Amino acid sequence: MKTIKTKKATGTLGKMVSEVNPVQLAKMRNRMLIAAKIADAMQAQHLNQKQFAKLMGKTESEISDWLSGDRNFTIDTLFDIGQALGITFLSTTLHYTTSDTYEYQPMMVSEPLEDPVP
């Protein structure tokens, strides 16, 4: 296993990083992962920002915001993006147990879910 050396940030950046709330950091990480997934799907379909904006009925500026990782998406917007790019961001499948109660288990998926009904 490869060992990664880390270096503690100092100065202004170090101070900023040390003051970041872990919850806010996790939220930012999720936004960045969504932005990266959108960018990867656009690249796979050979779409630039202008083409994707036209496909989505949005401005290039909005697409740029999406790809910056700063955007807090609604579920509906993520659904629309997923439909346009053929990707899925999350599954809302309920996993039932033997006691007829359900356990919600959100999961990130990288491929579209198959329709269970042929």
Image: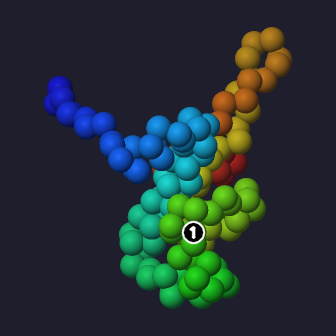
The residue located at (44%, 80%) in the rendering is 47
39 is higher (above) or lower (below) than 103: below
Q: Nearer the viewer, residue 81 or 72?
A: 72
Q: Which residue is under mark 1?
A: 66
Q: Is residue 89 left or right of residue 102?
A: left
The residue located at (68%, 60%) in the rendering is 73
Structural crowding at the residue carrying mark 1, measured as other residues with C-alpha within 10 Å and reported as few (<14), some (14–19) or many (≥20): many
Spot occupied by residue 107 in the image (x, y as percentages of width and height): 59, 38
Spot occupied by residue 79 in the image (x, y as percentages of width and height): 68, 61
Q: Is residue 55 left or right of residue 9?
A: right
Which residue ends up furthest to the left in the rendered image? 2
107 is higher (above) or lower (below) than 102: below
- Work out which quarter of the rendered image holds the N terminus and state it: top left
100 is higher (above) or lower (below) than 25: above
Q: Is residue 42 visible?
A: yes
Q: Nearer the viewer, residue 51 or 25?
A: 25
Q: Amino acid at mark 1?
A: Trp
The residue located at (73%, 56%) in the rendering is 75
Q: Nearer the viewer, residue 34 or 93?
A: 34
Spot occupied by residue 64 in the image (x, y as percentages of width and height): 53, 76
